[in-house]
Amino acid sequence: MSYTKKEYMDYVSRKSKKSPIVRDTVLAFIIGGLICVVGQAFSELYSKVFNLDKELVKIAVPITMIFLGALFTALNLYPKLAKYAGAGTIVPITGFANAITSPAMEFRREGLVLGLAAKMFIVAGPVLVYGIASSVVVGLIYYLINLF
Amino acid sequence: MNKKIGKQTVKLENPISIISSANVVGQKEGHGPLGDYFDIVMEDAEWGEDTWEKTESKMQHDTVTRAISNASLSPSDIDYILAGDLLNQCISSSFGLRDLNIPFFGVYGACSTMAETISLGSMLIDGGFAKNIACVTSSHFCTAERQYRLPLEYGGQRPPTAQWTVTGSGSVVLSRSEKGPFITHITTGKILDMGIKDANNMGAAMAPVSVKLTP
C-alpha cells in the first residue's frame, strides 16, 4: 500500500523543518525598527543641524534611505542582513530600493535596454501597480466624501 | 528479441559500460561530504568567465572533453552526445559543446537529466545505432536562480525547506567493454504529482518518483 496524496502531504509537513517563528519575528522587529531609527536620525539631522524646512525634510529622508538601500544592495550587504531580518528589511523604503536595484544588477549582463531597464521592475512591479491603483481609489473615495 | 519487462523497464541485450567520466563542481559542493571525490572544485561562481551562463557552458565543455580523453578517445570517435541543463533552450549545453562537432541530442529532464542521458545513450548503443556515446549534464546555482527565482542580491529570506540548485557538471562516455560499471537494465519513471505546492521545496516534489513510499 502506498501513500495517498493527503498522507504524503501530511508526511512532508511533519518532516519539514519549520521556520523559527519567534526568532524571525523578534529579529524582523528589531532590525526593521533600527532601520526606522536610522531614518529618524537623518530626519533630526536635516531639520536640526541643516535647518531644512519641514517639507524639504519629508523629501530628503526618503531620498537618503532609498540611496542607502540601493548602495547596500550594490555592495551585496543588504541580502546578508535580510537573511536574518526577514520582514524587517522587506519593508519600504529600503526594501523597495533593494527590490529595484537587485534585478537591475542581475540583468545588467543581458544588456542595458532589454536587460537592466526591461527587467528592473520585475520584483517591485506589483507594488507600483497596486499601490498607485489603490491610492487612486482612496483619492476618489476621499473626494466623494468631501462633497457632502 | 523482446527487451521489455513490465511497463517501465527494459533489459539491454548486452551490458553497456561506463568507460570513463569527469566532473567539476562549485565551492559549496566541494565543501560537502563528497568533496574529495570531485576532479575540479571551482574557486568561485564565475570560473574566469564574465557571465554565469558562460561559466556553465565552460563546465560542460570541460567535463565532456576530459571524459572523452579519459577514455583514450577523441571527439571524432563519439557517435552522439546527449546533453541537458536547466536553462531555456538548453543554452549551456548547445553553446558549451558547439565546437566538438558531435551529433547532438538535447535533453531536458531537470534533476533526472544524467540518468536520462545515460538511459537513452545505452538504448542507442544496444539498438546498434552507435558505438561510443557521451552523456553530460550541468546546472549552476546562479543561472537557475536567475531563470526561475529571484535576483541574488534581493533581500529575501529563504525558508528552511528551500533547496539549493547544484553548481556542477558531470559527463560519462558509454561503450561496449569488458570492464564495468555496467548498465544492464533501464527503468523509466512516470510523472507523479503528489500535490506539493511549495515551489521552494523541490525535494518533497521529487522524492515520490524515486522511492515507492509506504506510510
Image (spheres, coloured by chain):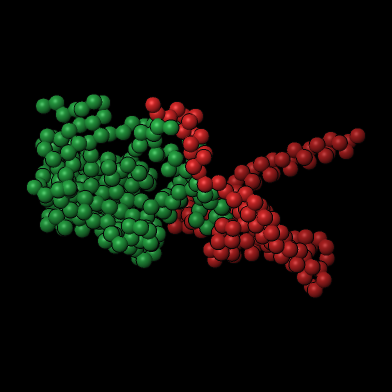
Q: Is residue A63 visible?
A: no
| Rendering colour (chain A) | red
| Point 65% across, 51% down: residue | A22
The N terminus of chain A lies in quadrant? top left
Quarter of the image holding residue B58? Answer: bottom left
| Point 10% across, 44% down: residue | B176
Q: Is residue A84 left or right of residue B185?
A: right
| Point 14% across, 48% down: residue | B180
Residue B148, x across and y down, in percent: 46, 46
**Furthest residue toward bottom:** A49
Residue A29, x across and y down, in percent: 69, 55
Quarter of the image holding residue A129? Answer: top right
Residue A48, x across and y down, in percent: 82, 71
Foreground: A27 or B25? A27
Residue B43, x across and y down, in percent: 36, 66
Q: Is residue B115 visible?
A: yes
Q: Which chain is green?
A: B
The C terminus of chain A lies in quadrant? top right
| Point 62% across, 61% down: residue | A69
Q: Is residue B89 left or right of residue A58?
A: left
